[in-house]
Amino acid sequence: MAETNKVLQLSSDGERLRVSSSGTSEVGAGIVSSQDNIFVSSVANTDAVIIKGGATEYARFLSSGLGIGTTPDTALHVDTNAAATTPILKLENSVVNYRFFAGSGTPQGVITGNIGDTYTDGYGGALYLKTSGTATNTGWTSIGSSGSLSGSGTDGYVTLWNGTSSISSDAGITYASNTLRLQRTDSNTTLSSQTPALRIVNLDPTATNFGQLSFRTIDSVGTETESAAITSYYAARASGNTTSDLLFSVSNAGSLTHRFTMRRDGKFSVNYTDLAGTYNAWVTVNAPGGVPSTSLHAANDAVAAFSDQSASAGPRGQFRAIKSTTAGNSTHAAGIYLTRSGGSTTSPAILADSSTLIGAITAQGFDGSTLQETAAIETYLEGTASAGVVPQSIVLSTGATNTASRTERMRITSAGLVGINTASPNERLTVNGALSLAETSGITSTASFGKLWAQTSTETQGSRLFFVGDSGSLTQLVQMSGNFEAITPTTGSIALDFAMSLAWNRTLTLTGDPTFTTSNRAVGRSMSVFINAGGSSRLLTFPAGWNWLTPVPTTLASGDWGVLATFCTDGNDSGIIAAWSYENATTTPTGTGTTNRVAYWTGTATLGADSDLYFDGYNFAVGTTSPTSRTHLAGSISQAISTITSSQSLDETYHTLICDATSGAITLTLPAASGCSGRIYRIKKVDSSANSVIIDGNGAETIDGAANYTISVQYGATVIQSNGSVWWVI
């Protein structure tokens, strides 16, 4: 049966089939033309279905099997007649596809494939699996070789060869969830007797790299790259042993850089890669250039080093910042940076609060049970920070115990003002307290202007205080051998400081009208002042409340002079006994008296016979001419007495305190002992309540070694006195 324009036609006997690309069909036995696409032949012993493209045959179906590119001799026979780089077979679904390659030798670096592809080494008898990389010729892993295996094991465990073709049951290696795990059991307790779990061996006896553990990953285009490495690096080699350093390297933007070293001698270094260099400390850090972002930084080629040396060559607990001088950076020194900002480490902000602690170097000492922070150098924000401006002050503090008891001893402000024992200096140097100057025989050079110096005491001159001015001129300020000269100022408010001596005399030549004040009054202290009016008449003003034994002087005529004698019976102005002796420059005073008695004026130029004040040049007395002590009072003393019903801060106006704590506990805060050496307070509790009277030392100062002293019972009393540093119950 035949029909025009049919592409496919089957003969009436059903044995022959021809499909023609011309669109016409014909039936024949074993007829082949150049336009045949599928040809069915029944030639004897060659029954076949042949698939062609033009004159090229692509597949042939025989009774023995399917042949692609060849006549089959098995059920499936494929011959690509192409290079090994072309896959032989590809299996694919909607998710993945796998390809099969074959060739001779290893595919590593030769065959480009994808994860999951396989490769058969027809000569080496090995099978490879592509385990990493897409469209790359690396990442091929050998997964077997020829030969039959025997043995059994546990799922997930890697096996070990136990012979030519047999394996042991399990190795100490498991693989699950993309994780390879090495495990073993070793009861040995010493490091030298333990069996290594992982051993990396370099068999090259000349290699400088003993072994390396490399960490790799796939980059954005699928290429395997090295991201980190641990390397055992050659230091020395001998029979039976080797010496090496352990190097840690990481990658930054594709460049593997050596960052950390564990040396053969147990020392460590960060960013210091000179393996042959000298390491003076257990930890050496080198951070070349830039602003530090960590708490430890050594700029440029500096080396910051910690040390805990036990040898006599250096101190224990040492920290050093070492700067070596090389070309290009000889003007820069090693530094220690203490940094602080507001905000967070990822988003720093300007410091907002004045007095913020910016950095501190604290010294700790071990007391047998804990570390005590007893000294520190601290920096504080001073005022307001702004762009390019961060004013700071430096504070030095010390103490006997811990942080809470540390006291500020010295401060340097951002303006360059230095304060000792004060947090608020108002001059280039402000000292709150006594200043001690070591005596010297003299200033031999005028090169150091602006100096205060104390001359060594001599028999004829005594100790003298001098000032060398900008011009190099020498000015004697005081002399301490019976006369205390050149009191300044010589006009305005003039302070008579009773703490200077028990019986010092002072000389004062006036340049204006003075108003006298007093300080550091205490029982038994005295002072005599020789006052010269100079070239003009002067008005004299003394504190109200003084007890005068003579008329109160109000004027001092030009050229005249007078002697002011004072004695303290307590710590108040009302307890000062004063006497005035006047000398006219042109008129010789008249009067008679007894040797060593202090005379007093009875008229313009007339002295009374004697007063009750007696001074023998060393001891001072009231009411007696036979003093047995520096100060001798032959009679009673009137001292200030105060009634206290609430907490008070005591000063020089108090002496005897009668405390009534009925309404609540009373705290009496003492002044600084250093400012009132010798001062005495008498304190008594008179009420019957359970409320206490608490005497509290100033800051860290103590009373009989304790922070405070408590009176709890009615009519309980105590007397305390300052020795210039602490208070004592007497």
Image: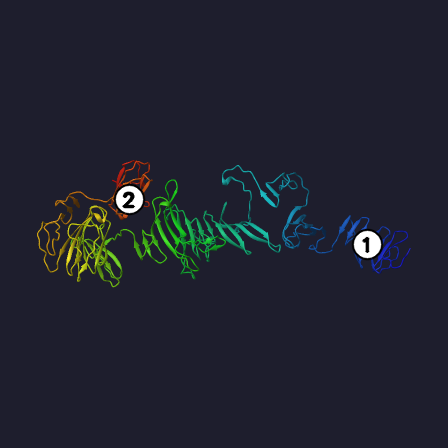
Tell me if 392 is positioned left or right of 513 in this view: right
- Which mark identifies residue 726? 2
Mark 1, other Cα within 10 Å: few <14 / some 14–19 / many ≥20? some
Q: Position of residue 359 (x, y in %)?
A: 41, 52
524 w.r.t. 516: above or below: above
Q: Secondary structure at mark 1?
A: strand
Contact check, label 2 and label 1, Cβ < 8 Å: no
Tell me if 594 is positioned left or right of 436 in this view: left
Q: Which residue is located at x 26 percent, y 58 percent?
A: 451
> On the image, numbered disc 1 is attached to which residue?
50
Tell me if 222 is positioned left or right of 526 in this view: right
Image quadrant for the N terminus?
bottom right
Q: Does residue 694 show up?
A: yes
- Which mark identifies residue 132? none
Q: Secondary structure at mark 2?
A: loop
Q: Which residue is located at x 11 percent, y 55 percent?
A: 603
Q: Does residue 706 show up?
A: no
Along the line of sight, which residue is nearer the eye, 671 or 6?
671
Image quadrant for the C terminus?
top left
Q: Select label 2 or label 1 by which is in front.
A: 2
Earlier in the chain: of badge 2 and badge 1, it is: 1
331 w.r.t. 362: above or below: below
Q: Position of residue 706 (x, y in %)?
A: 31, 40
Look at label 1 and name its amino acid. Ile
Tell me if 26 is positioned left or right of 140 in this view: right
Q: Position of residue 580 (x, y in %)?
A: 15, 53
Q: Residue furthest bottom?
A: 471
Look at label 2 and name its amino acid. Val
Along the line of sight, which residue is nearer the eye, 464 or 711?
711
Mark 2, other Cα within 10 Å: few <14 / some 14–19 / many ≥20? some
Along the line of sight, which residue is nearer the eye, 691 or 342?
691
